[in-house]
Amino acid sequence: MLADDVVAAPAPISGKSDMLPHRFAVDPPPQERLRKMFDDSRDSSQANRLLCQRDRDYYDGPLQLKSDVRRIMKQRGQPPIYTNRIRPAIDGILGVLEAAKVDPRGYPRNPTPDDENAADLGSKCLRYIADVSNFQQVKLDCAENFLIEGTAAIIIEADGQNITNTQIRWEEFFADPYSRRPDFKDAKYLGIAKWMDAADVKARNPEAYARIGDPVTGGQGALESTWQDRPDNIKPWIDRRRMRLMVVEVYYNEVKPPYASAEWFRCLYCASGVLEHDISAYLNPKTNETVCPIEAVSCYVDRENNRYGRIRDMIPIQDEINARRSRLLHLANSRQVQQSDPMAAPVDATTARQEAARADGVIPPGWQLVPTTDLAAGQQLLLAESKAEIERMGPTPAVLGRQGEAGQSGRARLVLQQAGMTELARPLGRLEDWETRCYRQMWMRAQQFWTGPMWIRVTDDVRAPEFLQINEPVMGMVMQPQPVVDPATGQPVVDPMTGEPATQMVPAVGVTGYTKRIAEIDMDIILDTVPDTANLQQEVFAEFVELVRGGLDPFTPQFELLLEMSPLADKAAVLERLRAKKKEIDEANAAQAQQQAEMQAQALALAQADQQAKIGQTVANTEKTQAQTAEIAFKMGQDSAGDVPPGASPAD
């Protein structure tokens, strides 16, 4: 593509061979027809392009005051003041687009777990492509052209495994002038035309440059396209003074033998001839048909196929605002006088006018001031009406957060914001459809050119980034050819039939297949737009805090159910964190309970051992006491037996 400030190489034809169309050598169209494509587009849209440039001037501001108006203001001694109401209106819409979070999601075609997992993988791939290619910023740049000049265009290409999104500047984009649809789906060709240095063109295409001859110094390229009755439309293809030439890259759709159906072709040419020509390198993998990588959209299209943006209707009102404000300032700085007494001393009217205009002037006798408050009041009322009218063409104050009471609930603010976007639904709906088509183009590029294993970064959780491998190879035992070696000589054996080294199939570790192949994923791409609900989320958060203060445990199923039903944007991540925290707490509680049980068991065992020891000691003491008692009794028996009275026998 002819990217802005970048000299890009032609898109390579790469990817899987079974995904590419059968390619045949096709001659490019005649040079006159190629130039006619560009000339017809410029010729038919020249008047509208001048109006689009005026729209841009009104957005910028200073050129809202024409030279004749500035001259009149200078004669009045009045500063050239203008009130640019257009820029805030357009910037407000761009702010709404920037604040809105758009999440591309893939939805499965069949209700099976495999399709659901594949659709989730596709969603992550789309987020990765949009993040790497900075699609959000490119979208805002295109949205600015969409709202101001009326047309936005982007080209989505592949450079190896890198999928690029490049804005096509409005002044460099051209299309089939007979296209009537805002999305250009009925256009037979779309293209880019820009001025390039001849040295850059030669360095990029040296062989083709030599074949067609030097366009700058040669005689064939010195032609000009002059539109009738339009002096400003002299569009030369060559600028010999600066050694620059117009280079056109066009994608056109037509039937060319031997192709049986219409295909998209790409041609790069200048005034002298064709530099590159081939069938489009980009495919729709589902249908295996060539596609045009350019996606364009227009804000409005009138019955003459003129494409314009939101500013076109604002310009008359902006002129009225500037004129009435200037008139009010002139009335405030000027005073009218009239002759009240014809019999007074004669005084020249010029002198009376000059004295009335001075701050310390003295009104001559016979003259009096004429009040102009009625004129100023009328101008003030009309000015207020004009300001209110132009504010209706942009986002309402409710959408921009400038309306609403201090204690207004978040739900009420959200309702007002949604109602304020109703009048912008049509242009913003077309822009959203264009964004969806861009994501589909990115997905087609990924399916066609991401054929090998690669890693992508998943940015769902910024605290713990996840990396995912796509087209992951599955390793296993496969049969692979191996040269047959003569054990006696150690040299490869030659097959006598073919004369080539003989091979034999032996088992070895190799790739048996692939998982997570995005080329096989079939899904629907839908954009989930998340509105800016900061006030509503803050209100919901405050309610959750009150529930927790009231005694509701955040780790209960009731709390999870309330959280799932809430409008919080990141409630899925919050639920995951709550469940992870609950699991962590449960594991900690289980470990603590187990530790307490072990300690209780140990304490019980110690108590039982102590009790057993005490029982043993008691038993031992009892036995000791019994033994001592028996011993004492025995000794007492012996003592009693030794004391026999005289004359008595021991038996007595």
Image (spheres, rainbow, N blue to C red):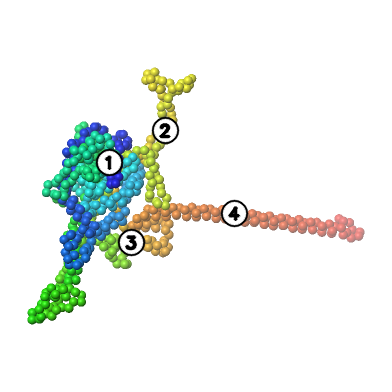
The picture places residue 501, in percent across and down from the top left corner, at 40, 22
Checking the image for residue 535, the label placed there is 3
| 635 displayed left or right of 201 | right
Q: CA distance from mark 2 to mark 4?
A: 57 Å
Q: Amino acid at mark 4?
A: Gln
Name the residue beneath numbered marker 1.
199
Evaluate if marks 3 and 1 touch, with contact meaning CB atoms under 8 Å apart: no
Q: Secondary structure at mark 2?
A: strand
Q: CA distance from mark 4 to mark 3?
A: 56 Å
Q: Mark 1 or mark 2: which is in front?
A: 1
- Residue at horizontal 20 percent and vertical 67 percent from the top: 78
- Residue at horizontal 42 percent and vertical 35 percent from the top: 475
Q: CA distance from mark 3 to mark 1?
A: 56 Å
In the picture, the quarter occupied by the N terminus is: top left
Evaluate if marks 4 and 3 touch, with contact meaning CB atoms under 8 Å apart: no
| 604 displayed left or right of 534 | right
Instruction: Relative to 35, say whether 435 is above or below.
Output: below
Name the residue beneath numbered marker 2.
510
Q: Secondary structure at mark 4?
A: helix
Mark 1 vs mark 2: which is more N-terminal? 1
Checking the image for residue 602, the label placed there is 4
The picture places residue 574, in percent across and down from the top left corner, at 39, 55
Mark 4 vs mark 3: which is more N-terminal? 3
Q: CA distance from mark 1 to mark 2?
A: 49 Å
- Residue at horizontal 31 percent and vertical 39 percent from the top: 448
